[in-house]
Image (spheres, helix red, strand yellow):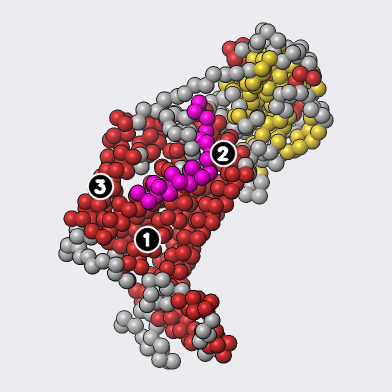
Amino acid sequence: MASEEGTDGVRVANAPTHRRASVHLLVALLALALIVVGFYAVRTLTLFVSPMLFLAAVFLEAVAVIIFVFAVVRALTLPGKVLRSLGTSAWEGLASNAYVVRQRTSDAAGMRWLRGRFRRDSPAGIWLTGTVAIAAWPLVSFLGVAFTVATGGALTRVDERIANLMPAVRTPGETAFFTAATMLVNWQALTFLTLAAAAMLWWERRRFLAVVVVGAVVGQELLATVVKLLVGRHRPDASLALLDVGTLGFPSGHAVRVTVVYGLLAYLLVKAYRTTVARTLVVAGYLVVVLLVAMSRVYLGVHFVSDVWGGVLLGAAFLTAVVGFLEIAARFPIVRHERRAGSAGRAFAVVPAIGIVFAVVTAPLLIHPHEHPGEPTSQQLPALDAASFSRLPLYSETLTGDHMEPANFIFVGTEDQLVGAFEGAGWARADRSTFANTLQAFAVGIQGGQYASAPVTPAFMAGEPETVAFQKATASNSLRQRHHTRIWRTDYAAPGGRPIWEATASFDDGIEFAGAAKVPTHHIDPNIDAERAFIIGTLGYPERLVPLTHPQMGHNGSGDEFFTDGKAQLVVLR
């Protein structure tokens, strides 16, 4: 039996509808689990800063929240007949309220305007109201990001540090991958994709949609350009980038493009396909494309994180407006149009497919990433004393720029001398924090094994990541315990011209679950002065302490306490 008659005369939803509601509830539970895992991942990757993993975790966390909300709403609305009956009864009761009746029948201009916003028989009614309401969220969020960028808020400090970290984590394979990803909406691929979509829609006699697609592509380009000119934010320094690009960066034009253009194609495919599986695959594919393009712009060093996030938000607001316009046009036809019979609409899936193939094939031919090494500059200190050292940056920093341990080493010498001193004393140079190295360190750490050259968690000083890091195993020969130091090359030189380096050092005495999210990380011995003494002893240099800060207690990025006398060991390398 498809449905049953209730005792009160209300026909309850049929079994398939209940099954669909159960499926959506299951999806909601899975999304909730992903939200929890995503929160854990974001907090973990904030500490173990692997930029690509961190950005992916943040994006996927946002996607999981959207899926959760959508699935809950769908699960609640699918058993529609009962809920609609209850909703109708509640609405009728509200409509018969004397106060509501007076307001609904009022001739005041404001009430007439408000009633018009909820009419179902007008294009300026409920459909336009819904479009504006939905578009408002990404638009307001975009304005918030733009305000933060314009006023130099906390997000800009994260921007600077991630941009400075990028050159240290790149690999040839990842560079080729993200070059292909960024090609997905380069102007050549965008032109090809737009022409292919318009031609397919024109052939299907959906000419109104063809015009809308072309108009949306042109419109989003104009919008992104105008906003860039208004905000006037410059891109990361050219020495950090692998591509030659223009000067203005907020919002990312590529992020706006991929959100709008691929979003519009995804919308048309969702309308063409009727099965939940097909629609889910379309939406999932769209989100993956947006993620890859957004990450590629940060990886290639041509945009800050806030540039691409702002671009996605602005693109989402514009896409909502376009989709809302199409939904209104479908209910209140602007022009009469037909399309060919059969499944021609589903064949539209070939358009994004050939667009992606075009990007992958042509990326190595049209995009040639290359480094733009900057010229190092340095200011010479008058002497190697406390007064001169006060000009140096004094503290290591977290990703957000908060102070951590003060520097407790000052080295004077070339990089070759520095590396030679540590490696000659049995220290291993830490690998870079690439995607593969970070995953390997996680795996080895969990298993309790040894990875002698494991990457250290990147830290910052004056916004720059460490130049080099060294570590030394203990008798336990495990990654869980290690001596380690991070060293930064400063913008200063000693009398005579040799570079000055600053370093922090600490001893990892085990693994802990730190922070509110209880993420696994190394726990440091709070006596960082003891580690300073250990290092100078292994290097074989005499003790030469100079006051740099002041005696203090504090916390590192994962919340571990430390204490120090505020002095730094001066080492003039031989």
Q: Residue at x 57, y 21 (%)?
A: 429
Percent of width and height locating residue 558: 66, 40
Identify the residue at horizontal 48%, vertical 46% (top origin): 227
> Which residue is the site of mark 3?
195
Residue type at mark 1 is Val
Q: Is residue 472 above or below residue 188?
A: above
Which type of secondary structure does the marked residue at label 2 adopt? helix
Which residue does the image show at 42% across and 92% down from the upper left?
Answer: 7
Q: Amino acid at mark 3?
A: Leu
Label 1, secondary structure: give it.
helix
Q: Is residue 402 visible?
A: yes
In the picture, measured across the screen, residue 256 lies left or right of residue 201, that is right
User: Which quadrant is the N terminus positioned in?
Assistant: bottom left
**Would you call the spot at circle 2 few (<14 residues within 10 Å), some (14-19), or many (20 or more)?**
many
User: Which residue is most to the bottom?
Assistant: 8
For label 2, the residue is 159
**Helix, strand or loop for the magenta stretch, by majority:** helix
Of the numbered discs 3 and 1, the one sitting upstream in the chain is 3
- Identify the residue under disc 1: 323
In magenta segment, residue 222? yes
Region in magenta: 218-240
User: Which quadrant: the C terminus?
Assistant: top right
**Circles 2 and 1: CB atoms closer than 8 Å:** no
